[in-house]
Amino acid sequence: MDRRDEAAIEAVKAYYQQDLSQAEVAARMGISRPTVAKLLAHGRARGFVTVEIHDPREEASELALRLQERFALACVRVAHGCVADEAEAISQVGRVGAELVARLVRDDMSVGISWGRTMSAVASHLARSPRQGVRVVQLKGGTSFSDRATHDFEIMRAFCDAFGAEPSYLPLPVIFEDTATASIVRADRGIERILREGRGVDIAVFTVGAVKKESLSLNLGQLEPGEVDALLRDAVGDACSRFYTRAGTVALAAIDERTVGIRLEELRSRPVRVLVAGGRTKTAALETALHMGLATHLVVDHDLALALLDRQGEAPRRGRSTTPSTDENTCQFSR
């Protein structure tokens, strides 16, 4: 080690450890400011000091890549930001989900949507992006028989306003009282046309719900108390109000037969399926949905992404990521 090395060590300690300015370091060492700059550069080159940058956006990109690989997805976006609770997580994924949907929707496409808090968040963040010939299709009924609202009409209207689209409403409850009534409704010419449109959409945008006592899907006045208990016992989640078990099977066939809307196998057949979910409470429901192949595109918050990887026995890699530190993360778009 020569005298230049010793001077460089003294400079980097004063500059990085003691937080002195280059001018202050120069005054302390009795040298010029340009000489301090050269000593700092020499110190970095010799490895006397290393600079580590921990960018949460880069970690989010790393998480996105891990999720994409683990669940064989076409695109993953991880919303990053300060998340204090589930409501904030839903708002964050709503923002990122709206950006992704706007990138995916093109002229003459049909877009199928569901309802709920997460879908309301997506709808509220949609900016006007006028397209030609777009139709927005409601994938399931949204009429409530309780004081809990699905906001299905408002969500449909927001999507239509954003893209200048024509709507196909499904003005029905999602679960009927009995299978006979549900069958009659499905057979109606107008309803059958909308259900057929839903089965053929180019893009489906939806969320998954955890099965809890307070879940919206269990509190619309459409289920008997015994059915709610059975779902709480057997179901891990729902997608488009189709309840499924941890094994990915129908949770309660009697309820599924009374449900009017897209079926899970029909949803899985759509070419682009954007699943937006926020909050750790949805971890088990989302994990199963992804194993079932319900999504091609995924939008999650940072904490939910970590929880998903943790359930797979994976921990995110640390260190600098080589992926772009943008919200698009693993998504690529052609024009």
Image (cartoon, rainbow, N blue to C red):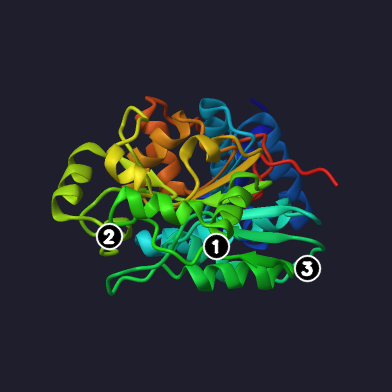
Sooner in the amino-acid sequence: mark 3 or mark 1: 1
Reply above or below: 32 against 230: below
Residue 45, quarter of the rendered image: top right
Decide: marks 3, 2 in contact (CB < 8 A)? no
Q: Which of 200 and 114 is in front in this view?
A: 200
Disc 3 and disc 2: Cα gap in Å? 37 Å
Report the amino acid beneath label 3.
Answer: Pro
Report the amino acid beneath label 2.
Answer: Gln
- Name the spot of residue 302 as percent of width and height, x first: 46, 48
Residue 83, quarter of the rendered image: bottom left
Query: Which residue in the protein does label 3 denote?
Result: 130
Q: How crowded is mark 3: few (under 14 residues within 10 Å), some or many (20 or more)?
A: some
Q: How crowded is mark 1: few (under 14 residues within 10 Å), some or many (20 or more)?
A: many
Query: Which residue in the protein does label 1 denote?
Result: 122
Q: Which of 135 and 47 is in front in this view?
A: 135
- Name the spot of residue 284 as percent of width and height, x first: 33, 38
Report the amino acid beneath label 1.
Answer: Val
Q: How crowded is mark 2: few (under 14 residues within 10 Å), some or many (20 or more)?
A: many
- Name the spot of residue 18 as percent of width and height, x first: 50, 54
Is 137 left or right of 90, judged from the image as shown?
Answer: right
Sooner in the amino-acid sequence: mark 2 or mark 1: 1
User: Judging from the image, what secondary structure is the residue with disc 3 in?
Assistant: loop
Q: Residue at x 63, y 51 (%)?
A: 197
- Name the spot of residue 168 as percent of width and height, x first: 61, 63
Q: Which residue is drawn at 78% across and 68% down?
A: 130
